[in-house]
Amino acid sequence: MRNLILFFQKFYLFFLFIGLETVSFYLLAKNNNFQNTAVVNASNYMVGQFYESVSWFTDYLKLRDVNDQLLQENAKYRSGIIQSFYNGNIGETTKIDSGLKQQFSYIPARLINSTTNLRNNFLILNRGTKHGIAKNMAVITSAGIVGIVMEASENFCSVQSFLNKNAQISVKIKENGYFGPLVWDGANPQYGTLTDINKHVNVKVGQDIITSGFSSIFPEGINVGKVEEVDYDAGGNFYKLKIKLATDFGNLSAVYIVNSLMKKEVEQLETNAEAQEKKAVNTNVPKPH
Amino acid sequence: MIRDLLLHITRFILFAAVQVFILKKLDITFVNPQLYIMFILMLPVQLNPGWLLLSGFILGMTVDVFYNTQGLCAFAAVFLAYFRIFYLRTTLSKDQLDTIRQPDIASTDVQWFLIYATVCSFVHHFVLFFAEVFTFTEILQTLLRIVTSTVATVMLIMLTHFMFFRVRSRE
């Protein structure tokens, strides 16, 4: 017993060291998801490496077949996409279904001019009033969002890019539906900033962000990007999410202009409501005699 | 005794505050100076090693709370504190170990202190950044981060020393 006490006395420092390091590491691994998974996967690492180097070699042998298969698949999809019908009519493809009522139609357009390095960026497209383009139509690509039409002349239209101080798009997290405004902070054309999502919401890096459809400009469910970084608003109750945009603004060529066919109806309702409100106010005001 | 305790508590608060309110805001790629470890470097030589480890742990946890990295800084700080015991034992003579109160330039010399600060910062940063990324796949990037941050930390430590600590011995 005396020897045991002496032993601990002699080495107490080492035990204290190990103890404190264990506590720190426990906290680190418990609270940090990355360390957590890394510890679990450390044993699998060697096995995975081995498998990967084997498949790196065998994949080469299959490359020819895979290429043929991909080409066939591409040809099939290409014949099905909107652009294939472009020459036949002006390109506005509408779907006729007696049960469903079409809310959005898509007009293909080509970029004539664009910038990405200014604080307020605009794009020019080769479609105008002649093709049914009007103010406040949304512009998207197959990858993600682009902007909103600001002005349309007979043959062209100018689009306020998302990379603009005044652009704000209502988006939501695909997984749980929590929504907020997405803006561009002016620094990097690859990232946007999403605010106003409450801290109690479980947000993870890599979650998909899609349009919310609240503004009636953008259809619901268009891909916007992925959560790249989860940060907190200084002193607030909200997240400040860094979103990696799906659209590559530096490399845009073919885009679609979204024509919201029911927007008129919505706007009509709004103006009617406003007019009625005005009328109500007017009748309440006593007329001067 | 009480005066020393108060002195070190003040230093603790100042170093932690400078770290989390000023240096954390520094936004240069790959440069994350960790000036707060100077608190551990400047603790008295004769301090009980147990207390040394504990103060390193508490300092690390304090910084962790502000960096939102539970346990990470504490892990590296405790490691540094343990490393310091052996470093001082090997580089200082028995005589110095008994007489020097704190390992600064005044009681040793500039060269000894510079090496002391560099080696300790490097060891600390090595542990800190590898524990942070926790993988060897980005090893070059991590090593670059360690080296640049060590240089920045040592520069800040020397600057702080010349500005706020005794450089010449009293006699």
Image (spheres, coloured by chain):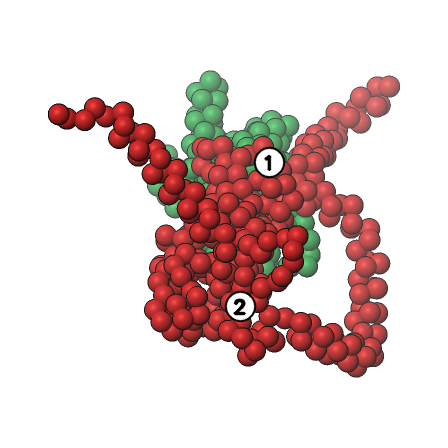
Chain colours: A red, B green
**Residue plotted at (36% across, 65% down):** A152
Q: Position of residue B107 (x, y in %)?
A: 45, 39
How many other residues sit within 10 Å of disc 2, few (<14), some (14-19) or many (≥20)? Answer: many
Mark 1, secondary structure of its residue? loop
How many other residues sit within 10 Å of disc 1, few (<14), some (14-19) or many (≥20)? Answer: few
Indicate the amino acid at tag 1: Val
Is the C terminus of chain A in the top left, top right, bottom left or bottom right quadrant?
Answer: top left
Whole-angstrom CA distance, mark 2 to mark 1, is 40 Å
**Is A230 above or below relative to A92?**
above
Count all numbered tags in the image, as a single digit: 2
Indicate the amino acid at tag 2: Glu
Front residue (pair A25, A217): A217
The furthest residue to the left: A289
Front residue (pair B136, A264): A264
Is the N terminus of chain A in the top left, top right, bottom left or bottom right quadrant?
Answer: top right
Q: Which mark lies nearer to you, 2 or 1?
A: 2
Q: Position of residue A248 (x, y in %)?
A: 52, 65
Front residue (pair B75, A214): A214
- For label 1, the residue is A201
**Residue plotted at (62% across, 47% down):** A174
Q: Position of residue A231 (x, y in %)?
A: 52, 42
The furthest residue to the front: A289
Front residue (pair A65, A35): A65
**Is A23 above or below relative to A166?**
above
For residue A176, say whether it is visible: yes
Q: Position of residue A57 (x, y in %)?
A: 81, 74
Chain of the residue where label 2 is placed in the rendered structure: A
- For label 2, the residue is A92
Chain of the residue where label 1 is placed in the rendered structure: A
